Amino acid sequence: MTSAQHDTGDGGTRVTIIGVGPGDNGFLTLKAKQAVEEADLVAGFETVLNVVRPFAKNAELCSMAYRDQEKVLDYAVGKVKEGKSLVVCAWGDLNVSAKELLDRVRRRVDHVDLVPGISSVQIAMARSGLSLEHVVFVTLHVRDGAGSALEELTHYLKEGRRNVILLPRPFDLMPAGIAAGVIDQGVSGDQPITVYQRLTHDDEQSWSGTIAECAAITTEFSDLSIIVFHRPASELAR
């Protein structure tokens, strides 16, 4: 039995889904690497496949984009029903922002095996010297509209008790717009923040300033961004 097992033993279909980490394949777990090495097919978005490509020497790579992901998954799962093993790859850790992809796979098979990965949230905490007990994590990947998406963030920023790590929603709800949105909802523009872009990649960058300064930025941030809202200095002194 392999980590990319395709037969549940009762005639059902099984697929392995892995988190590939934040970008540098040095953060790919040994369990995920083994799954890729043993798979007959490996599916994922092209940028994600680039992380695992060196380890998928024996697999058929099934690259997908937003416009054709349903078609690609239908093809790959069809191969599973023929007896092939399939590994589906997602950015970072499966429990952070991969719910839509997980749901798509689960609709097609009887069982999924999840192999967690390293999240950009963990890398951002390491870069910032923060520990989990001093952090609140908020993700905007749930698509309920910009207003409701910012409500939870605004609550924790006004409370000011802990640092807030925010995972933006790519393309339509990015750092400058988020900064402007929380200012509109009464958050102080003087609060310090750091925006990390493309963590662990060769072209990793970071920007630090205040919420107000971020709101004024007109250049685009990477879609692989994560924001740290630092706890106000008045709270740190307590």
Image (tube, grey):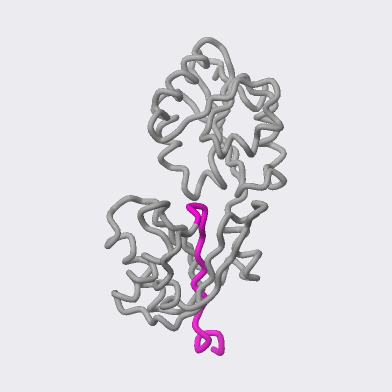
Residue 192 in percent (x, y) is at: 50, 78
Which residue occupies the foreground of this view, 68 or 122? 68
| Location of residue 131 with respect to 14 vertically, above or below | below
Residue 134 in percent (x, y) is at: 56, 72
Q: Which residues are magenta?
A: 222-238
| Location of residue 229 with respect to 114 vertically, above or below | below
Q: Residue furthest top?
A: 82
Q: Quadrant of residue 198?
A: bottom right
Tag count: 0
Residue 43 shown in magenta: no
Rendered residue at 35%/54% (across/down):
172
| Location of residue 62 with respect to 214 vertically, above or below | above
Residue 233 in percent (x, y) is at: 53, 86
Residue 165 in percent (x, y) is at: 50, 65
Q: Quadrant of the N terminus?
A: top right
Q: Quadrant of residue 109?
A: top left
Rendered residue at 65%/70% (across/down):
129
**Residue 224 in the figure: left or right of residue 211:** right
Which residue occupies the foreground of this view, 38 or 132? 38
| Location of residue 9 with respect to 48 vertically, above or below | above
Rendered residue at 59%/43% (across/down):
116
Which residue occupies the foreground of this view, 138 or 64? 64
Q: Quadrant of the C terminus?
A: bottom right
